[in-house]
Amino acid sequence: MNWYDKDGNLLDVATASDLLSNEEYKRVGLTEVASGDRSAVHIVSTVWLGLDHAHGDGPPILFETMVFGEGSWADQDCQRYSTELEARIGHAEQVALVAATVPDEVITELPAWPKTGGAR
């Protein structure tokens, strides 16, 4: 199994470990989509994985978007990408898909995972 940086360059295990512990490096996007009354709260998270999730079958898969929250979106949607650009586009698409299901949606870009409430 190979480790790669966000630009697709091979990494040694020690460097990959250092980067995996850097929340800012790992995070591509973190967006909360909530209903106006906050009865529904979803988090769309896109991160750099580092480890090739294609497992050598095609171009390395290095990024992942997941949707966390209540209702029909709860932990069920996962998309993976090879490049950071694809991941950023995919993140925006997932935010739009979730927002379309939430009444009076409020979309907030988060600097970090919420400390209380919300998904992790």
Image (cartoon, rainbow, N blue to C red):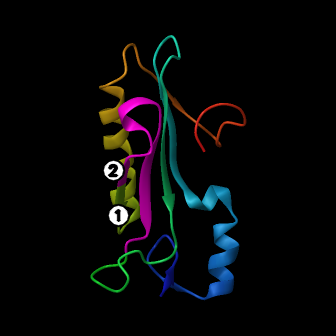
Position of the C terminus, as image quadrant, is: top right
The mark that comes first in sequence, 2 or 1, is 1
Q: Position of residue 50 (x, y in %)?
A: 52, 73
Q: Are marks 2 and 1 in contact (CB under 8 Å)?
A: yes
In the image, residue 74 lies in the stretch drawn in magenta: yes
Q: Is residue 38 left or right of residue 99?
A: right
Q: Is residue 86 left or right of residue 39?
A: left
Label ID, residue 81? 1
Q: Nearer the viewer, residue 113 or 87?
A: 113
- Residue drawn where x is 31% and y is 79% of the image: 59
Q: Position of residue 85 (x, y in %)?
A: 36, 59
| Above or below for 77 versus 49 | above
Report the amino acid beneath label 1: Tyr
Question: What's drawn in magenta, residue-wise?
Answer: 61-78
Q: Position of residue 57 (x, y in %)?
A: 29, 84
- Helix, strand or loop at mark 2: helix
Q: Is residue 4 left or right of residue 20?
A: left
| Above or below for 5 versus 10 | above
In the image, residue 68 lies in the stretch drawn in magenta: yes
Label 1: how many Cα within 10 Å (few below 14, some 14–19, many 20+): many
Q: Nearer the viewer, residue 6 or 43?
A: 43
Q: Which residue is mark 2?
A: 90
- Residue drawn where x is 39% and y is 13% of the image: 104
Q: Nearer the viewer, residue 31 or 84?
A: 31
Structural distance between the alpha carbons of marks 2 and 1: 8 Å
- Helix, strand or loop at mark 1: strand
- Residue drawn where x is 42% and y is 53% of the image: 65
Q: Which image quadrant is residue 112 in?
A: top right
Label 2: how many Cα within 10 Å (few below 14, some 14–19, many 20+): many
Report the amino acid beneath label 2: Gly
